[in-house]
Amino acid sequence: MPQHQRTPLLLLVLVSAVAALPLTGCAGRQERVCSPGRDPVLAVNDSGSDCIPSDEEPAPGWARYPQGKVPVHLDDKWDRYWADKTLDQHGRVVPLPR
């Protein structure tokens, strides 16, 4: 193929590859709240969260998230939900203290 005919084809392939980058690779990954083998916990009657080994119980003053309301990825539905809420000492969802 002559040089002048390969250039537009090469350019088309390059542009297509660059356009596909957001659909693949790192762009599709979300950062996890905790690493594998660890579970998120939240501070009782306070702001804050942490990660503990999955086979351990939370320390006093900390609680596991209620079943079905556990954040998995940063900025997912439940991560946003808990941004202004916490649990009280009875396990009830309450607004964060000011």
Image (cartoon, rainbow, N blue to C red):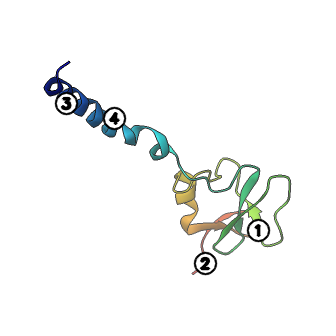
As drawn, the residue found furthest toward the front would be 2
Label at residue 47: none
Marks 3 and 4 sit apart, C-alpha to C-alpha, by 15 Å
Residue type, numbered disc 3: Thr
- In the rendered image, which residue does mark 3 sit on? 7
- In the rendered image, which residue does mark 1 sit on? 62
Q: Nearer the viewer, mark 3 or mark 2?
A: 3
Residue type, numbered disc 4: Ala
Q: Nearer the viewer, mark 4 or mark 2?
A: 4
Which residue is at a point 18% across and 29% down the rendered structure image?
Answer: 8
As drawn, the residue found furthest toward the top would be 1
The numbered mark, 1 or 4, whose residue comes first in the sequence reads 4
Query: What is the x, y in percent for residue 35?
Result: 69, 53
- In the rendered image, which residue does mark 4 sit on? 17
- Where disc 2 sits, the SS reads loop
Q: Place residue 62 in its image quadrant.
A: bottom right
Query: What is the x, y in percent for residue 16?
Result: 29, 33
Marks 2 and 1 sit apart, C-alpha to C-alpha, by 15 Å
Which residue is at a point 81% across and 64% down the rendered structure image?
Answer: 58
Q: Nearer the viewer, mark 3 or mark 4?
A: 3
Query: What is the x, y in percent for residue 12?
Result: 23, 30
Q: Is residue 31 above or below residue 3?
A: below
Disc 3 and disc 2 in contact, CB within 8 angstroms: no
Label at residue 97: 2
As drawn, the residue found furthest toward the right would be 56
Which class describes the residues within 10 Å of circle 1: few (<14), some (14-19), or many (20+)? Answer: many
Q: Is residue 94 left or right of residue 76?
A: right
Q: Is residue 11 visible?
A: yes
Marks 3 and 1 sit apart, C-alpha to C-alpha, by 62 Å
